[in-house]
Image (tube, rainbow, N blue to C red):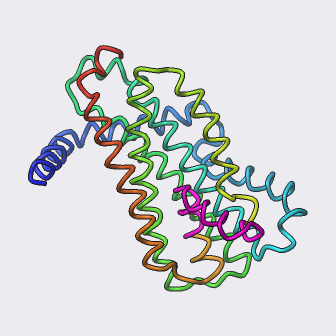
């Protein structure tokens, strides 16, 4: 335990000493993403909205007739999945795309991963603001319990960092991981109940959905916003457990292969 605390303090100290570089990396990621686009950051909002529109047109006739606030139901799943995909995909390529900098300057390599995640998080907050506007239009009353949405978002951020560390390390050694992960994301999208409900499945199958951390986060948000209920303490513990376990696994994986990265970049 003492070794872990000392290691964490050392990492925080290094992060603080490289704060300026971190801020510049975040700015650069934003400028690079929207370079030569007419709408710029507006695409951060338009992209999930267009996805929502397509899903609503396709699936409303199948599920929308029996699902209360189906637009919000879709939107909640869409923005969480979009953030997860963007954060983890960007995190995966963070070291390779900054190889020229890493090979010249001795800085913590996780800074590049963190900067990509910050830019993805800002995009997520922009779409979240639009999500709340849709809630108002759909007649959903804002309640004090909405403040609890900070918890699943924080868990999702931690989880994305952990997965990003694992993917970025794997991508340094195996470029094929990018294509395999793309297939995995397609599978994950269909298993996260974004456009359908799980109520029609047997109870045992519904429990299996809880093995999917992304679905757990989506369900939490839907419970607060649509159902107007606060998840149980056990459900909070499940969200936190997924976040911490994945983050610790990512940190261990990242640290284990840290010294070997420079030979493959």
Question: Residue drawn 24% across and 33% down?
Answer: 108
In this view of the protein, which residue sits in the foreground, 90 or 191? 191
Task: Measuring from the top left, give residue 18's x and y in whole percent.
Answer: 21, 39
Question: Residue drawn 77% across and 77% down?
Answer: 68
In this view of the protein, which residue sits in the foreground, 143 or 5? 5
What is the quadrant of the C terminus in the image? Answer: top left
Q: Is residue 32 above or below residue 197?
A: above
Secondary structure of the magenta portion, mostly? helix
Left or right: residue 190 compared with residue 99: right
What is the quadrant of the N terminus in the image? Answer: bottom left
Left or right: residue 161 compared with residue 64: left
Task: Measuring from the top left, give residue 171's x and y in whole percent.
Answer: 45, 26
Magenta region includes residue 54: no
Task: Measuring from the top left, give residue 194's x and y in whole percent.
Answer: 69, 58
State the extent of the magenta-drawn residues as a range.
Answer: 198-220
Left or right: residue 53 compared with residue 240: right
Task: Examine the image and state in which quarter residue 61 appears.
Answer: bottom right
Residue extending furthest toward the front: 204
Q: Is residue 6 above or below residue 202?
A: above
Q: Is residue 260 above or below residue 43?
A: above
Question: Residue drawn 52% across and 27% down?
Answer: 177
Residue extending furthest toward the right: 61
Question: Residue drawn 84% across and 74% down?
Answer: 66
Magenta region includes residue 212: yes
Task: Measuring from the top left, give residue 106's x and y in whole percent.
Answer: 20, 25
Residue extending furthest toward the top: 263
């Amino acid at each position: 335990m003492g070794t872990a605390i000392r290691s964490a303090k050392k990492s925080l100290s290094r992060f603080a000493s490289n704060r300026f570089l971190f801020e510049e990396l975040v700015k650069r990621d934003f400028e690079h993403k929207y370079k030569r686009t007419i709408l710029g950051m507006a695409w951060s909002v338009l992209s999930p909205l267009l996805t929502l529109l397509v899903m609503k047109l396709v699936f409303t006739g199948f599920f929308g007739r029996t699902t209360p606030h189906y637009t919000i139901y879709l939107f909640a799943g869409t923005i969480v999945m979009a953030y997860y995909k963007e954060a983890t995909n960007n995190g995966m390529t963070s070291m390779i795309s900054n190889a020229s900098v890493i090979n010249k300057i001795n800085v913590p390599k996780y800074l590049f991963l963190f900067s990509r995640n910050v830019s993805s998080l800002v995009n997520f907050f922009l779409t979240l603001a639009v999500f709340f506007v849709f809630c108002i239009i759909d007649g959903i009353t804002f309640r004090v319990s909405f403040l609890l949405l900070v918890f699943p978002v924080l868990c999702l951020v931690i989880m994305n960092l952990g997965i990003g560390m694992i993917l970025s390390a794997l991508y340094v050694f195996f470029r094929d991981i990018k294509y395999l992960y793309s297939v995995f994301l397609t599978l994950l999208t269909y298993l996260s109940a974004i456009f359908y409900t799980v109520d029609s499945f047997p109870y045992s199958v519904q429990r299996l959905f809880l093995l999917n951390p992304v679905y757990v986060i989506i369900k939490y948000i839907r419970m607060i916003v649509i159902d107007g209920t606060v998840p149980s303490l056990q459900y909070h513990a499940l969200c936190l457990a997924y976040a911490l376990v994945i983050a610790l696994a990512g940190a261990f994986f990242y640290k284990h292969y840290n010294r070997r990265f420079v030979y493959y970049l």
